[in-house]
Image: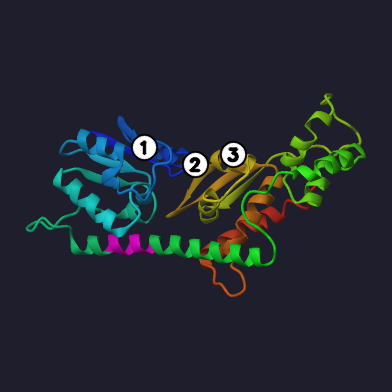
Amino acid sequence: MANLVYKRVSTDQQSTDRQNLVLAEAGIEDPVVFEEDVGTSSRLHPLERPKFGELLTYARPGDTVHISEMFRLVRGTGHVLDVLDVLHRDQVALRIHDGAFSAMGLTARHPRTGELLSTVKFMVQTLAAAGELQRDLQRELTYDVLRAAEAKGNKGGRRPAVPADKTDAVRTAYLEGRSIAALARDHGVSRGAIRTTVANLLPEDTGPDPGVPAPELAVVLDMPGKVADFLRAADLEPAERAALDQGVTVRRGQGYTLRVTAVPAVHRALLDLCQPLDGTPGTSAVPAQRKARREYGNRVSALGADTP
């Protein structure tokens, strides 16, 4: 009897690190891994995904399919039941190792009719619907927050590069002693954009300068899983994305905490990006997400003021 492991990520900016950790902790013996190509959409029905199709072809009666969490495989209630029907037909078990579905025997059938137990079917439909509702609310909240920001003249997403008509002014100010951090604030761009603009003006000597503040040291903070899930779908700078991808997952009951190692400036940037979880006037926030953001905010605030 084989252990078949299925993994998938939705975008090329995500990684399977968390899935790998959950599956490694499960102690699966001699796993046969089927991993979808990067960017395989969750909107595509699982039975139409190439690697899951290969898995079903490979599977034999008595095998077990292992996934880290249900939503790596399915998104909607209809998809869940379709997959369970096929696995039952092929006499293949399904084992989920994290999340709300991990404590359920999803392939349990009535001993006489052979149909999925009504209680199992009800729980599957309820939990899948709750997951859909949470994602829909998050999308709606994010949309409303972005509209409110645009009404005030602000735009979401990645901070822009230095406009061409501002390049000379930035370079002149830098030569006059203005810091990169201060120029980034003045022009509303990232520090990386300023460094790119003044790249050929930067000193070649990388030794410490008594007049320049020491670089920030990386610190480790625990980020609630609900915050991490929201940020993984956000438009992040490379340093922010790397901090999330390299985070270490620590399981907490049915949820998890992501242990993120990054300099304080990156922690503060990530905290700013998840502001929509707090809601805005005229919109409501999901209480659990709001609580998670505030927990992370308290930890970031303890780091002290930003160094210019």
Estimate the x, y position of residue 260 in percent, counting from the top left.
60, 44
Residue at position x 15%, y 38% in the image: 61
CB within 8 Å, label 1 to label 3: no
Q: Mark 3 Cα within 10 Å, few/some/many (few <14, many 20+)? A: some
Report the mark closest to the observer, 1 or 3: 1
The relative height of residue 127 versus residue 2 in the rendered view (above or below) is: below
| Residue that carries the numbered disc 3 in the rendered image | 242
Q: In screen coordinates, is 306 left or right of 146?
A: right
- Label 1 and label 3: CA atoms lie apart by 21 Å
Q: Earlier in the sequence, mark 2 or mark 1?
A: 2
- Identity of the residue drawn at 51% across and 64% down: 288
Q: Check contact, mark 3 vs mark 2: CB within 8 A.
A: no
Q: Which residues are magenta?
A: 123-130
- Per the image, the residue denoted by label 1 is 36
Specify the amino acid type for callout 1: Glu
What amino acid does circle 3 point to?
Ala
Name the residue nearer the viewer: 179 or 32.
Answer: 179
Q: Foreground: 151 or 60? A: 151
Residue at 70% x, 63% y is 153
Residue tagged 2:
14
Does dot 2 land on a helix, a strand or a loop? loop
Query: Measured along the vertical axis of the image, is residue 304 above or below residue 91?
Result: below
Direction from residue 290 to residue 22 in the image, left or right: left
Instruction: Estimate how packed mark 1 is, as few (under 14), some (14 to 19) or many (20 or more) residues with alpha carbons within 10 Å.
Output: some
| Residue 202 seen in the current view | no
Tell me the residue at 85%/29% (across/down): 208
State how far apart marks 2 and 1 are (Cα). Answer: 13 Å
Query: What quarter of the picture does the N terminus occupy?
Result: top left
Q: Main secondary structure of the magenta part?
A: helix
Q: Identify the secondary structure beneath mark 3.
A: helix
